[in-house]
Amino acid sequence: MPAADGPRRDPQTGQMASFHGRRVGKPLRPVQAEAHARLFDRYRLSLDALAEPTALFSRPVEALGLEIGFGGGEHLVHAAGTRPGWGFLGVEPFLNGMTRALMDLEAAGLDNVRVFDDDAALVLARLPAASLARVDLFYPDPWPKRRHWKRRFVRPDNLDLITRALKPGGLFRFASDVPDYVDWCLREVRAHGALAWTAETADDWRRPFEGWPGTRYEAKALKAGRVGTYLTFLRP
């Protein structure tokens, strides 16, 4: 089950967890609760195992990807299925989304994913430097109220962690339907200075990423008449 709310510090790195948001939505149905109890330990990512992240998987992997806040797992499961040679780490503190993803991973017969149900910053801080080929952050909570902007994941301390964990040539990908958060992301990344925006034409941020399967949050946004923006940043 998700860890309790409140500040937590990783005893090894000293990194403070700072997750904000709901951890549980509607009560799980019995079949969902049974699936979570049965599957979570199978796919669970242990922070202590991150010293050798490629050893998390039953066979060698050619690259590692991290998805922060994978929601119901639509993209994570799709990515794991289309890139069987990669290993994927997924972070989602929301119990209902985690359970949906676990059930879909089992149904797809995938074993190249490991999941974590707390703050992604704890994972990023434990990973070896230059160990990730890609970090994905799709449709994160925009925290629209000004007093909550400090809770947005894209901020200097987390960009430090992302940059450190990405290998040269690695990508940080961000998608949102909230123009203010898109602008915020561009400003924060530019001010940070360690990642380069790869866009050359307007279509580069208007067009979804190659092989993009969509997510439930994107579908909800499109139904409401909002459009997504898709940003890719390169670690030189």
Image (cartoon, grey):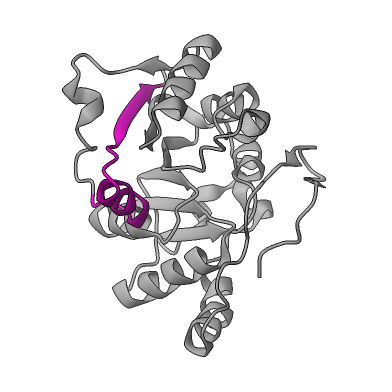
Quarter of the image containing the N terminus? bottom right
| Above/below status of 63 relative to 74 | above
Q: Residue 104: percent from the left, percent from the top?
A: 36, 71
Magenta span includes 1: no
- Determine the residue positioned at 35% across, 17% down: 197
The residue shown at (39%, 15%) is 196
Q: Quadrant of residue 71?
A: bottom left
Task: Tell me the quarter of the picture where residue 51 sits.
Answer: top right
Above or below, 126 relative to 35: above
- The segment highlighted magenta reads 213-234
Picture coordinates of residue 25, whole percent (x, y): 57, 67
* Relative horizontal placement of residue 132, taking residue 63 as reference (left or right): right
Asked if residue 138 is positioned above or below residue 115 in the image, the reply reads above
Residues 201 and 107: in front is: 201
The quadrant of the image that shows the C terminus is: top left
Identified at 32% across, 73% down, the residue is 109
Q: Nearer the viewer, residue 37 or 42?
A: 37
* Residue drawn at the location 30% of the way across and 72% of the way down: 108
